[in-house]
Amino acid sequence: MPINTKGSRHPILKYKPDTLFLEEGIEEYSLTQEILSRLPDVPRQGFQDISTITEQIISSQYDVFGAGKNSLALSRFKGSFLKKCPGISPGMVCCNYYIVSLSKNCIYDCSYCFLQDFLDNNPIQVAYVNIEDLLSELEEVFTQYPDRNFRVGTGELTDSLAIDNIVPYTNHLIPFFNQQSNAVLELKTKSDQISNLLNHSDPTNIIVSWSLNPQTISELEEKGTPSLTQRLEAARACLDKGYRIGFHFDPIILIPGWEAAYKQLVDILCDTLPIDKVEWVSLGSFRYRPNLKSKIINRHPNTHLFNSEHFPGKDGKFRYFRPLRNQAYKTIRGYLTSRSKELSIYLCMETNEIWEDVTGKTPRSDKKLDQFFDL
């Protein structure tokens, strides 16, 4: 398969919702007013119970998940924002990652996205506007556990930056995290929407991390996303501004010729950015729960995700056969270490056995990762 490093065959999304749905009572929040000021000409509709909107979408659309991306509901989050990463599974090494639920659904349409199954009955894109409640909760937790290091992310149920120009969470989160002594914020993204980030002068406690795949794979499986070049340009701008940066090669997809494709990806990354300035690179293979496969095939009939066989693991998720995963991790890790011996590389959602096979050690052997890993 030819390797392409130029632009994407899919148009990059510049998001503007067709309709804004406003939960009753949320106009009092300052973030609501910020969002409304950015979307003055978008039709608005109030609601008391979001299930009525969801039922409307489900009853009228064939592609329910895709249709949910076209609207934006502003709501108040009820409950605890801060949670341990839901990816924790039996037998898997945990990187002690915490998530906050600020938003759900994503404007991009990656074929492998687990949200296609996870949000099957709640497909509408939602942004929670009671960010003051979030910051109060985080302040209380960080103060209660001063000796614990918290790595907190916002990119579990959405892309952290894809609509930051419309819903400017980072304008609130960055100043808050920069005041913390025991917490860092990780913004996981495929986006190049970094204009708000560049307005902050001291982003010491912020790590911006980009999901990367070879451009060939991105064109096939990551519809609507910025190209590899655009993501790396955004990373360069953030690095120049003082942000810490990281990268996630996740999911690794084993297409024919994957070795050359990922070699070129590593070379482009290391030739574009000073690799010694990168906080970490994570490696994770394509994995999925059984219900997701049929949804991927229905929504993305031209996908290459299932060209190889997959087998269920201890956590019930399907993955490439263990020898294939070992080979992929060792190969790509070798490409990275050949460019930097000091680079911190970790495996995402893998067993201790895979860690030992690939690296000859467990995360406790890496000082930079030790502060976050919980074994």
Image: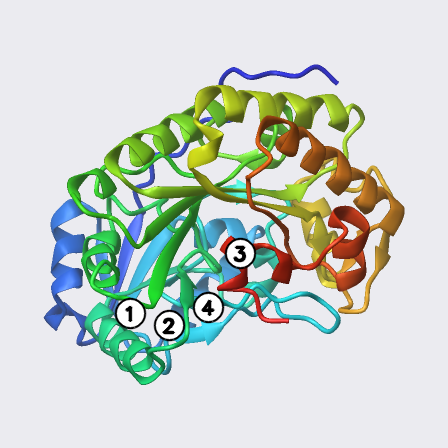
Q: In the displayed structure, would residue 337 be above or below residue 117?
A: above
The residue where tag 3 is placed is 367
| Amino acid type of the residue tagged 4 in the rendering | Tyr
> Cα distance, mark 4 to mark 2?
26 Å
The residue where tag 4 is placed is 98
Q: Are marks 2 and 1 in contact (CB under 8 Å)?
A: yes
The residue where tag 2 is placed is 50
Residue 34, given in percent of the width and then of the height, sits at 13, 55
> Cα distance, mark 2 to mark 1?
9 Å
| Nearest to viewer (mark 4 / mark 1) | 4
Q: How is the image coloured?
A: rainbow
Say left or right for 309 vs 63.
Answer: right
| Nearest to viewer (mark 4 / mark 3) | 3
| Nearest to viewer (mark 3 / mark 2) | 3
> Cα distance, mark 4 to mark 3?
20 Å
Q: In the displayed structure, would residue 23 be above or below residue 244?
A: below
SS for tag 2?
helix
> Cα distance, mark 3 to mark 2?
45 Å
* Closest to the observer, 114 or 24: 114
The residue where tag 1 is placed is 75
State the residue at coordinates (72%, 58%): 350
Say which label, 4 or 1, has the lower sequence index. Answer: 1
| Amino acid type of the residue tagged 3 in the rendering | Lys
Residue 375, given in percent of the width and then of the height, sits at 64, 71
> Cα distance, mark 3 to mark 1?
41 Å
Say left or right for 5 vs 79.
Answer: right
Residue 127: quadrant of the picture: bottom left
Say left or right for 219 vs 371.
Answer: right
Q: Are marks 4 and 2 in contact (CB under 8 Å)?
A: no
Q: Which mark is residue 327?
A: none
Callout 2: 10 Å neighbours few (<14), some, many (20+)? some
Where, quadrant-wise, is the N terminus in this rendering? top right
